[in-house]
Amino acid sequence: MAQRATQSVMVAATPSRVYSVVVDFGRYREWVADLKEIDVVERDADGRALEVAFRAAAFGRSTRYTLRYDYSRAPELLSWHQTRGDVAESLNGSYRFDPVPAGAPESTGAPESTGAPESTGDPATTVTYDLEVTLAVPVPQFIQGRAAGRIQRHALSELKRRVERLP
């Protein structure tokens, strides 16, 4: 059975800047700690990565999976679904990039939100990561839920750190 989770983080940058980091797959190995290999398998007519193969550390082992990206709602939303994988039977997700109004409070108000820039009027983005995963091996749902949550927390913290450290 699929396990779904959603988490958000506030990043001190414009939505377009955060989006540009997310779609720059060629640089993922510079900032995604558990990523071992990445290969853009297919690009669209605009040069955007449509299908990307990954090898990453996960669940105490190395896993391979291939994701197909959907840019139909870009740059506000980038979604994907797994086309191949050895640990997950299905892996569907999205990043949503919402501008934070100037002077907004430091928290998005969602209990699963983490990190926020100080309210200085500088550009900020709420990045929401939605993930639905079904593991290929039988695992209790609460463990699948914990795994999905860990993946999200790790991905969002690495993304935030990367975007906010770029010049």
Image: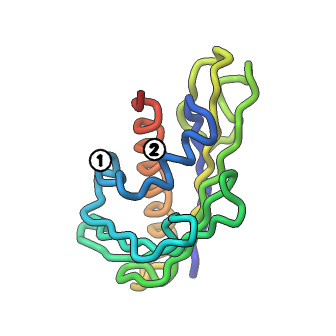
Of the two numbered discs 2 and 1 on the same chain, state the one appearing first in sequence. Answer: 1
The answer to whether one can see residue 133 in this image is no
Element carrying mark 2: helix
Quadrant into which the N terminus falls = bottom right
Between circles 2 and 1, the one closer to the viewer is 1
Tell me what residue is drawn at x 61 percent, y 60 percent.
78
Residue 90 in the image, given as x and y percentages of width and height: 51, 80
Q: Is residue 102 above or below residue 146?
A: above
Q: Nearer the viewer, residue 7 or 31?
A: 31
Tell me the kind of residue under disc 1: Glu
Q: Is any part of residue 48 visible from this angle?
A: yes
Residue extending farthest to the top is 120
Near mark 1 (Cα within 10 A), the count class, few <14, some 14-19 or many ≥20, is few
The quarter of the displayed image where residue 81 is located: bottom right
* Crowding near the residue tagged with mark 2, few <14, some 14–19, many ≥20 C-alpha atoms within 10 Å: many
> Residue at (51%, 65%) from the top-left corner?
47
Who's the residue at 41% across and 58% down the image?
25
- Residue at image mark 1: 30
Nearest the viewer among 146 and 77 is 77
SS at mark 1? Answer: helix
Q: Dot 2 corresponds to which residue? A: 159
Image quadrant where one finds the C terminus: top left
- The image's mark for residue 133 is none
Amino acid type, mark 2: Leu
Q: Quadrant of residue 119?
A: top right
* Residue 39 percent location from the top left of the image: 34, 70
Nearer to me, 59 or 37: 37
Considering only vertical position in the picture, is 145 above or below 154?
below
Q: CA distance from mark 2 to mark 1?
A: 11 Å
Residue 24, percent across and down? 44, 53
The reply to whether discs 2 and 1 touch (Cβ–Cβ < 8 Å) is: no
Q: Position of residue 158 (x, y in %)?
A: 40, 44
